[in-house]
Image: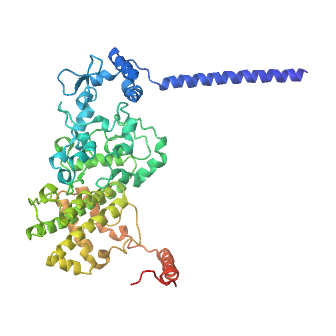
């Protein structure tokens, strides 16, 4: 009996302890829940706005978004951003109210608290209205209504407002939360940086950076700050990591041009001179970018990868130079007709009419395939450098020369008739011995020019040296290239042998070819075809 009573006492004690523990845990969770919800202290005007909107059911989700924002925590309410003075371009009276409000808060309003960010943005190419200065295809090939929710929707980020301010902060920071987490999502950049002419979101997703983000990004807290030279707290970069966030060596910035060394979206790739008086020359901008890269990568990898991408940009220029030469030639002999011959841009539909195949080929060889070729090389998007890039740029060049041949040009006819593989490189070449990825002993079986021109590397060396002397490559890059050139037997894998490995895969390849021939190539169905020739 005493044993039973003892057990009952123990059960009672443990039950009581369990209840106490559960109550403590519940209290902690309730406290945590209360702590997660910000305390909001707002003025009477903002409260009036909220009450009226909620009562009428107007944009209530925007109120919910604001309540979760840092603005709400700091006491920044509706009226602080929507304050308006009589006579301002967007001043309006709310219906059934005598409150004068601004319909369109602009960067000028944001600058009252975020002056540095607004200034940095205004000095970046995000704020540059280049599409209006030279609006190309939009001016001729597209009808106006289609541009309203086409070009203009994305380029609103560079809108010039009647109050003189530039930009659209909520293009990246969603109304009304102004969330850093939303702004840092690659998909936010991908709202505009997408598609056939600048597929940066697709390139990013294809890259190892994007692959890591897809696998692990859902576990990352993107509500961080790097404005005080903090370490980047995530495992792989987002778009903002490379172009805006800071690290131990680089300050955070809203000037997305501060780290760009090329104008590789233009018809020609050239070293940027954007806002040099404040940002420094292209080499200074490149140093800022490599300072971010150094958070994850070793110096040799960074230098080799970026030098290779730089040579891709220079290679694009030589392909374009050949395409422009053919367009000029066809214009001069009357094969192609223009309203005005523009020897610099030479792809402007306003000037050339857009209605002849060489003009189309030149435009797309720059604006679509040429951008993908260069940007894929800069952002680790191999498929965009290759199949969506150089392959299609070459196709455009071939189409142009074939068009000239069809219209009687002797040089073009000779090119078309040639069966020599070198005809696909009618321009000067750039190259680098090896790559950033490592050493391969079989990397030199292709392309054709490697094994058929004994002076191949001498020609390349002369071109790279000329680019350096022109200021298109830095002294450090020229020294790096020379080192690889002087040790090309190592970097190209020519001094190493892996015959047993090579022969193993060679035998497998031969066996596959043999089986394909037996199974399919030599297979002839007995049934007769149905089409009578």
**Residue 525 in the image, given as x and y percentages of width and height:** 51, 83
- Seen at 42% across and 38% down, the residue is 222
> Would you identify the image quadrant in which residue 391 lies?
bottom left
**Which residue lies most toward the top here?**
44
* Placement of 276 over or under 459, stated as above or below: above
* Placement of 384 over or under 225, stated as above or below: below
397 sits to left or right of 202: left
Say how the picture is coloured: rainbow
Residue 481 appears in the picture as rendered: yes
**Residue 242 in the image, given as x and y percentages of width and height:** 34, 46
**Residue 123 in the image, given as x and y percentages of width and height:** 21, 39
- Seen at 27% across and 36% down, the residue is 168
| In-front residue for pair 359/66 | 359
Residue 307 appears in the picture as rendered: no
Q: Quadrant of the N terminus?
A: top right
**Which residue lies most toward the right here?**
1
174 sits to left or right of 399: right
**Residue 270 in the image, given as x and y percentages of width and height:** 20, 55
166 sits to left or right of 74: left
Question: How many numbered callouts?
Answer: 0
Q: Quadrant of the C terminus?
A: bottom left
| In-front residue for pair 45/22 | 45
* Placement of 22 over or under 408, stated as above or below: above
| In-front residue for pair 97/265 | 97
């Amino acid at each position: 009996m005493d044993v039973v009573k003892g057990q009952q006492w123990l059960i009672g004690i443990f039950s009581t302890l369990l209840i106490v523990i559960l109550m403590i845990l519940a209290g902690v969770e309730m406290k945590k829940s209360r702590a997660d919800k910000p305390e909001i202290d707002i003025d009477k005007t903002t409260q009036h706005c909220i009450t009226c909107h909620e009562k009428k059911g107007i944009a209530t989700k925007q109120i919910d978004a604001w309540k979760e924002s840092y603005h709400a925590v700091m006491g920044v309410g509706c009226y602080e951003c929507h304050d308006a003075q009589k006579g301002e371009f967007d001043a309006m009276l709310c219906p059934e109210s005598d409150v004068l409000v601004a319909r369109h808060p602009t960067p000028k309003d944001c600058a009252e608290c975020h002056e540095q960010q607004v200034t940095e943005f205004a000095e970046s190419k995000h704020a540059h209205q280049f599409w209006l200065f030279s609006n190309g295809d939009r001016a001729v090939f597209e009808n106006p209504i289609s541009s309203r929710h086409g070009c203009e929707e994305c380029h609103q980020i560079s809108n010039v407002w009647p109050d003189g301010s530039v930009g659209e902060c909520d293009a990246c920071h969603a109304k009304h939360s102004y969330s850093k987490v939303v702004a840092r999502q690659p998909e936010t950049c991908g709202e505009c940086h997408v598609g056939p002419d600048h597929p940066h979101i697709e390139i990013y997703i294809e890259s190892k950076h994007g692959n890591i983000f897809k696998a692990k990004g859902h576990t990352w807290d993107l509500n961080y700050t790097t404005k005080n030279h903090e370490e980047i707290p995530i495992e792989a970069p987002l778009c903002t990591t490379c172009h805006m966030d800071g690290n131990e060596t680089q300050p955070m910035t809203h000037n997305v041009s501060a780290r760009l060394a090329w104008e590789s979206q233009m018809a020609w790739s050239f070293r940027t001179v954007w806002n040099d008086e404040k940002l420094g020359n292209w080499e200074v901008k490149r140093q800022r970018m490599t300072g971010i890269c150094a958070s994850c990568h070793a110096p040799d990898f960074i230098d080799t990868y970026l030098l290779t991408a730089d040579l891709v940009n220079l290679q694009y220029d030589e392909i374009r130079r050949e395409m422009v030469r053919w367009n000029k030639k066809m214009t001069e002999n009357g094969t192609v007709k223009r309203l005005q011959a523009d020897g610099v841009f030479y792809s402007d539909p306003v000037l050339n009419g857009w209605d002849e195949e060489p003009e189309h080929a030149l435009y797309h060889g720059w604006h679509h395939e040429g951008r993908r070729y260069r940007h894929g090389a800069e952002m680790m998007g191999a498929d965009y450098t290759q199949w969506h890039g150089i392959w299609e740029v070459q196709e455009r060049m071939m189409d142009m020369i074939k068009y000239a041949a069809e219209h009687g040009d002797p040089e073009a006819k000779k090119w078309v008739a040639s069966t020599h593989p070198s005809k696909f490189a009618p321009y000067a070449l750039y190259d680098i011995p090896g790559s950033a990825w490592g050493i391969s002993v079989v990397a030199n079986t292709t392309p054709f020019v490697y094994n058929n021109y004994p002076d191949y590397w001498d020609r390349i060396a002369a071109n790279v040296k000329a680019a350096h002397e022109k200021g298109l490559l830095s002294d450090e890059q020229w020294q790096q290239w020379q080192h690889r050139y002087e040790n090309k037997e190592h970097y190209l894998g020519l001094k190493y042998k892996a015959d047993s490995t090579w022969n193993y895969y060679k035998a497998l390849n031969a066996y596959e070819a043999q089986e394909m021939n037996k199974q399919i190539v030599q297979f002839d169905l007995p049934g007769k075809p149905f089409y009578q020739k």
